[in-house]
Amino acid sequence: MIHFKTFANCFIVKGASRSLVCDLQRQASDFIPNDMVEVLEVLNAKKSLDEVFQIYGEENKEVIREYLDYMDEKEYGFYCEEDEFDLFPELNKEFLVPAHITNTVLELKTENIGWLKDLIPQIENLGCNDIAMVFYEELSKDDFSGYFLLFCGYKD
């Protein structure tokens, strides 16, 4: 039985009215109809083309075949036999960052601004790259610039 499998480096992002096939390796993308996403999900669940044509009916066979041929031509996926299907594993989608924390929100008042000098090295040691500062009091432009420069000028 013939199967169709999307390449592991091609991600499908479903949108509200249409979807996008993103080829991470080639840095290319193309729009596809949302209905085709469902068909591709069924195919990637190891259903054969014949099973898909039974599920979606003979009246949709030609349209499905055209989209699969398009996906094959653009190298977003490929036709294969059932015994070949599992030879192409999915990519690990786990996301790792070299930081203990990814972001920090600092809520500050005038009375605790002095903590910044102690907090900045600690945040830096955690590998945190994104910091949001929330001030509950109005700051002058000079005060804000001074606090901002504490982050820019931090050195070990």
Image: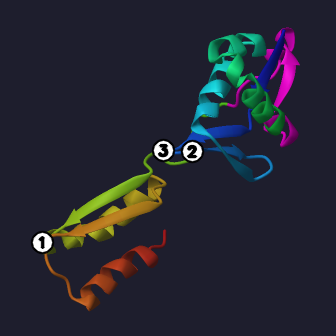
Amino acid at circle 1 = Glu
Q: Nearer the viewer, residue 1 or 132?
A: 1
**SS of the residue under disc 3:** loop
Q: Tell me how far mark 3 sits from mark 1, CA to CA.
A: 47 Å
Residue identified by numbered label 2: 18
Amino acid at circle 2 = Arg
At x 78%, y 38%, the residue is: 76
Marked residue nearer the N-terminal end (3 or 1) = 3
Marked residue nearer the N-terminal end (2 or 1) = 2
Judge depth for marks 3 and 1 and give the one in front.
3
Residue identified by numbered label 3: 16
Query: Crowding near pointer 2: few (<14 within 10 Å), some, many (20+)?
Result: some
Query: Crowding near pointer 1: few (<14 within 10 Å), some, many (20+)?
Result: few
Mark 2 in CB contact with mark 3 (< 8 angstroms): no
Q: Which mark is residue 111?
A: 1
Question: Residue 49: within the magenta?
Answer: no
Amino acid at circle 3 = Ala
Q: Is 46 situated above or below 29? A: above
The residue stretch that appears in magenta: 71-91
At x 73%, y 28%, the residue is: 64
Left or right: 104, with 12 as reference point: left
